Amino acid sequence: MKEKITTQYFEFNNIKNKHNINHKNKHNITKKIHNNSNNHTSQSRQPIPQSRQPIPQVGRPSSQSRQPIPQSRQPIPQVGKPSSQVGRPSSQVGKPSPQVGKPSSQVEKPSPQVGKPSSQVGKPSSQVGRKGKGKYNYLKNLTRKSMLLNKNVEDIYRTFVINSSNFSSYSVYFYVNIGSSKEKVNQYGISHVLEHMIFKQTSKFKTAIDMATYLEDVNITFNAYTTSNKTCYMFTTSSTKHELLKRIFVVANEMLFNMKIRDKDLEIEKNIIKQEYYNGLDSVEDYLGDIFNMIYYGEHPFYIPTIGYIKDIENMTKENIFDFYRKYYTSRNITCFIFGNVPKLSYCIKYYKSYFIQKTKNKKLYLEVIKNNKKNNKKNSKTQNSKTQNGKTQNSKTQNGKLNKNNIELKIEELKNEKITFPFYYKNDLYTNLNLLFNNDNNNKLMTILNNNIKKYIPTLKYKLYITKFNNNNSLLNKGNIKPICNYKLHINIDNINQSYIKFIFLNKGYIDNDYMYIKLFANILGNKKLFTNILFNILREKYGLTYSINVDNNFTFEDGYTSISINVNKKNEKFTLQIMEKLFNDIKIDCHNYLYKNNKCKILSMDKYNKIIAFTKNDITTILDDINNIEEFYVDTIIYEYKMFSINSYINKLNSINYNLFIKFVYQYINEYNIFIFN
C-alpha cells in the first residue's frame, strides 16, 4: 500500500547571547535544513566562512521558566484520545462548545491590529542554499546538541507538520505539557479552569465573542480539552487556504502567552465549571471511572480527577491561575502539530514566525528544518530489504554502524531524551495498591488516603469498600492442574445505583511490552466493537442477554498498562455474570494448554477466528486517512506518547509478523493474572 502522508519538522530557537552572533550579518535568522542523510547537509551548499560561525557555549538550558517537578509527582501518560468510559484515567473535560456556522455578513469583523509578516522570513524554499542570497544563512557547525546545551537558549518553538492530500482541510493543535497530574494540593482542577479562562480575554481580544468572530468569519472553529497530562487547543479549518494560518497563529499567541483575567469572567467560568462538575456526578459511569483511578493509582498523581475538587475550584484565585499560567505556558512546554492537507512548509514557517513567536529584543532566532528526502528513503528501504548470498536479511546499518533512520525519527528520539517536550514518566509500582488495601487495618495509610479523596470528590457519596482474594483451591481457574497467581476482587457498595458495574483488569508493561501487538490482538478477538462476531458479544449478549454493551480497551503507558473489560449488568445477574466470565477464562486457558502441550486444535481462539481478526484489522487500519480526526489518534499520539512515528505499512507488517503459536502461548500466560472491580 502506498501511504500518502509525510511528516516534517521545524523549530525556532531564541538566543540572547550577543557575543556568539556576528553583528555584521543584517539578517537575524539562521537556518539549518536536514535531509535524510547521515551528515544532515547537502554537498551543493556553500560552506560558511569560519569567521561567521558562532561558537556555541556549553551549559544547561535556563530553568527559570520551568520549575523541576518532584519525582513522586511524575505522571504516567495515556494513549489515544481521552475516553469517557469507566477506568480511563484522563477523561476529556472542559471542551467549550465552538460557535459553528457562518456569521451574518452584517457583523463587523473585529480584526486585531496585526502587522505585516516579517520581511526577514522571505522565501525559505526557493532562496535556500544560494551563497550570498536569500533570507537565510546555513549554520553547519552549530549542532543540535550544542544549541540545546547553550545556556543562552531561552525559548524553543517546536512544530510537526503531518501532510496528506487525502483531506480537504487542515487542523492546528497546540499541546501544552501540563494536566491534572502536576497540580498541587488545594489546587486540583486548575489546569481545566485555566483552559476555560484562556478563551475569555487576551491583550488583543477583549471578549470571547471577539476572538470567536475573528476565527469564525473565515470558518475556523476552535476548541480545547484537558487530560491528566496535557492540555490541547484545537483549530480546524474548512479549506486548505494558507492565509488561515495567520489568524490561527494570532489567536494561539494571544491565548497561550497573553491571557488576561477579569474578576467577573472568573466567577462566570467557575459557575460553568461547577455545572460541568455536577453533570459528571450525575453520570454514574463518569464518577465510577474517577473512583476506579483513585483505587488503582493509589498515591500516584494519576488519581487526581481532571476536573478537580469542588472546594478547590471555589477557592481558586486569579493570582493562583496566573502563577500556574506563567510557570507552564512557555514555548519550551508547548508543541504545535499542523496536520491534514497542509499548506506549503514555507507558509507554515512564515506565519508561525511572524504571528506566533513572541517578539523580543536583543535575541536572535535560529531556524532548524527537518525534511525527509524521498530518494534516500527509497534507498534506505532497499538497504533494509537487501539479502546476503545465503538468503539472510542484512542488518540495516550505515557505514558508521548506526541504524538507518530518517531525521524525523532521530529528532523524536532527541525530544525523548530531553524530557522537556512531552510527558515523560518514571515507572512506579502501581500494582501493589490492591495488596496494600487487602492487608489493611484501621490505620492503613492507603485506605485513609483513598477514603479522603473520595469524600473530597463526592462529599455526599455513601459507600462501603471491601476486598477479597480469589483463585483459591475451589476456583474454576484451578482445574486442569493450572494454578494461577493470587488475584483480587474489590467490591464497592454504593447507594442509589441501579446496576452492577464490573471491570476485569489484565496487567501488562505498556508500550515497552514485548507482547504489545499480541495484547492488542487479544483485545480485538475478545470484544472488537465493530464486530458482532467477537467472543464476549456472542456469549454475554446473544446467548444470555446479560448486558447491552461490552467495552474492551487497552490503556498503555510508557512502562506499564492494562487491558480492561467493562460490563454493566442488572444486580440480580451479577453473580451469574461473574461465573460465566470465570468459566470463559478457564476454558480459554485450558484450550491454550491443550493446543500447546497436547497438539489439540483451539476451539475458542481458533485459527479461523485468528485469521479473520487479522484480516479485519489490516483492512480497518487502511481507512485511517478517510477521517482527519484519526491523524491525532494515530500519528500525533504515537509521537507524543511512544516517541515513534506511526506508519500504516509498518503496522500491517507487524500484523503479518504475528505468529499464531506464539499468540496462543501469550494468551495462556496473560489471561492468568487479572483483578476484578465490582461497583454495585
Image (cartoon, rainbow, N blue to C red):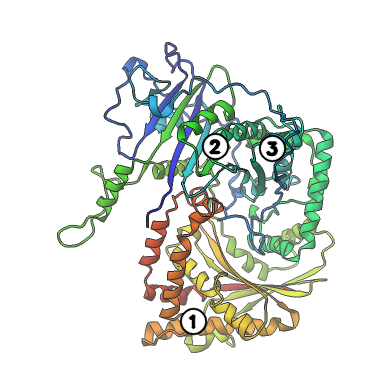
Name the residue tied to disc 2. Answer: 241
147 over 401 or under it: above or below: above
- Left/right of residue 557 with respect to residue 327 in the rendered view: left
Q: What whole-number distance in Å separates the C-alpha atoms at marks 1 and 3?
A: 51 Å
- Left/right of residue 635 with respect to residue 317 in the rendered view: left
- What is the three-letter code of the residue carrying label 3? Phe
For the question of whether residue 472 can be seen, the reply is no
Q: Between residues 287 and 216, which one lies in front from this camera angle?
A: 216
Q: Which numbered disc covers residue 324?
A: 3
- Looking at this rendering, what residue extends furthest in the front direction? 105
For the point 62% across and 33% down, the residue is 247
Q: Which numbered disc covers residue 589?
A: 1
Q: Between residues 437 and 257, which one lies in front from this camera angle?
A: 257
- Left/right of residue 502 with respect to residue 646 in the rendered view: right
Mark 1 and mark 3 lie on one chain; the one further toward the N terminus is 3
Q: SS of the residue at dot 2?
A: loop
Mark 2 and mark 1 lie on one chain; the one further toward the N terminus is 2
> Dot 3, how many residues are within 10 Å of its Cα: few (below 14), some (14-19), or many (20+)?
some
Q: What whole-number distance in Å separates the C-alpha atoms at marks 2 and 3?
A: 35 Å
Figure quadrant of residue 145: top left
- What is the three-letter code of the residue carrying label 1? Lys
State yes or no: discs 2 and 1 in contact (Cβ < 8 Å): no
Figure quadrant of residue 279: bottom right
373 over 569 or under it: above or below: above
Horizontal and vertical percent for residue 47? 30, 22
